[in-house]
Image (cartoon, helix red, strand yellow):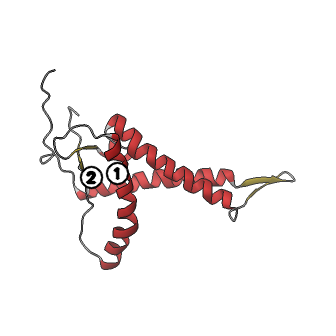
Amino acid sequence: MAHQQRTSTRDAAPTQARRVTAAVVDALIALLCGLTAGTAAGIKVVDGLVELQPQSPTVWATALGVAVAVSLFNHVLLTLASRASLAKLLTGLRVVRASDGGRPGFLRLVGRWLFGFYWMVVFVPIHVVTDSGVEQQDAVGLRIVRRTARS
């Protein structure tokens, strides 16, 4: 097997703005897909009139389930196949192992995805309230780096 040269993850660090943009776009994709599915599940036709029933638990369960499923697909399965989620592909980023810049594994991607929810629920509100300058973190031995022409 030929020796493959790895991209130095230290040299390829993305700006914080690029990382945040990718995270926000990925979140919006999942939320919009969830809301669209929830809306579709809440539509009821009564006497030829279309009504949306937002109070229905079916609407919110469908919205939440689809948002989580899209997020899982985007952050784990798509990243496993292409080394990047949709927004990371658009912003020129990719996910690599921190140790050697290699392809991330399934379990690490699942851990990174779950850590993202933890970060969003615990740390984002703290940073917003305290107006702190803490930057987004890498987790579970994976890093976000800029995509190079060879990647």
Q: Nearer the viewer, residue 76 or 136?
A: 76
Q: Amino acid at mark 1?
A: Gly
Q: Amino acid at mark 2?
A: Val
Residue 70 vs residue 86: left or right? right
Give the quadrant of the C terminus: top left
Image coordinates for residue 150, horizontal then vertical, percent? 20, 31
Residue 11 visible here: yes
Image coordinates for residue 47, horizontal then vertical, percent? 87, 53
Q: Nearer the viewer, residue 9 or 148?
A: 9
Residue 58 vs residue 78: left or right? right
The residue where tag 1 is placed is: 111
Q: Nearer the viewer, residue 21 or 145?
A: 145
Helix, strand or loop for disc 1: helix
Rendered image: mark on residue 140: 2
Which residue is situated farthest in the top direction here?
1
Which residue is situated farthest in the right direction here?
47
Image coordinates for residue 85, horizontal then vertical, percent? 37, 44
- Are discs 1 and 2 less than 8 Å apart at CB? yes
Residue 86 visible here: no
- In the image, is residue 147 above or below residue 143? above
- What residue lies at 35% left-to-right and 78% top-to-bottom? 129
Q: 10 Å neighbourhood of mark 2: few (<14), some, or many (≥20)?
A: some
Q: How many marks?
A: 2
- What residue lies at 40% left-to-right and 59% top-to-bottom? 117
Give the quadrant of the N terminus: top left
Image coordinates for residue 3, horizontal then vertical, percent? 12, 26
Rendered image: mark on residue 50: none
Q: CA distance from mark 1 to mark 2?
A: 6 Å
Q: 10 Å neighbourhood of mark 1: few (<14), some, or many (≥20)?
A: some
